[in-house]
Image (spheres, grey):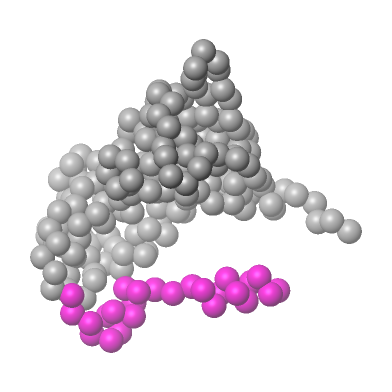
Amino acid sequence: EIKERVTTAFKYDDFAWQKANNIVLDHPKRAHGLHSLLYKCAKCGTEGKMHSEGIHLWCEECGKKWEMTELGELKALEGETEFDHIPDWFNWERQQVKKEIENGTYHWEDEVEVFSLPRCWRYIPLGKAKLTHDIEKGFILEGHYRDADYYIQRTPDQTNSLHVEYGFPALDKMDYVDISTENDSFYCKPVKQNCITKLALATEELYLRSQAKTPTAV
């Protein structure tokens, strides 16, 4: 009960607050980076082909384009505006990921470039590896470093959230996910960019699913 009350208290919606208080943000690059969160096209459903620049967000697959208004809303330049409230689009993406998990089709894998951070002052390049995320096994990172193979697994019940970095300035300003162990952090840069938000959503949904299956201790 305490956890539920704290979780509810921490929920907020900056976009709703902005509109309710008529806060005008006329920055010429206000939509910059929005595609990292809105990675799935609301019109055609294609993932990873969204882009943003200036005040616009668009899909390179179907060509649909939206403008981010000075009140923080989205407006389609042509046709229907699928989501004018940005959090509604984001929550729709979460529901799409949840459906993939429920029907058993969710699976992600890619080649990644890995950097280890055993201490807080130096990243150690480990080269290429394979990162997989699926419903039953969770995250599996498999690679080879200094003449030895390594295998790291984090099951769904071990991972309630995912540390993601958008345009990570500490390395090369690309997107990274961090798979952490008890004594190290492995920063992984996927070849497929604009995918880490989906991984974060899937991580949260898989954890909730694992907790629902866990019997309550007596």
Foreground residue among 117 and 202: 117
Q: Does the magenta portion include 44?
A: no
Where 28 sits versus 158, above or below?
below
Where 1 sits versus 202, above or below?
below
Q: Is residue 25 left or right of residue 120?
A: left
Q: Is residue 104 left or right of residue 56?
A: right
Where 185 sits versus 166, above or below?
above
Query: From the image, which quarter does the N terminus lie in?
Result: bottom right
Foreground residue among 139 and 209: 139
Query: From the image, which quarter does the C terminus lie in?
Result: bottom right
Question: Residue 95 at x, y = what percent?
Answer: 46, 53
- Regarding residue 24, the answer to whether it shows in the image is yes
Specify the farthest residue to the right: 218
Question: Residue 186 at x, y = what percent?
Answer: 48, 37
Question: Residue 143 at x, y = what percent?
Answer: 49, 22
Q: Residue 21: name its quadrant.
A: bottom left
Specify the farthest residue to the top: 147
Question: Residue 102 at x, y = what percent?
Answer: 57, 44
Instruction: Say which residue appears at 58% left-offset and 30% top-offset.
Output: 152
Q: Residue 121: name its quadrant.
A: top left
Instruction: Say which residue appears at 64% left-offset and 45% top-offset.
Output: 158
Q: Magenta part mainly helix, strand or loop?
A: helix
Q: Does the magenta portion include 16?
A: yes
Residue interval drawn in magenta: 1-25
Instruction: Say which residue appears at 47% left-offset and 35% top-offset.
Output: 116
Specify the farthest residue to the front: 121
Foreground residue among 69 and 28: 28
Instruction: Say which residue appears at 38% left-offset and 48% top-offset.
Output: 165
- Regarding residue 104, the answer to whether it shows in the image is no
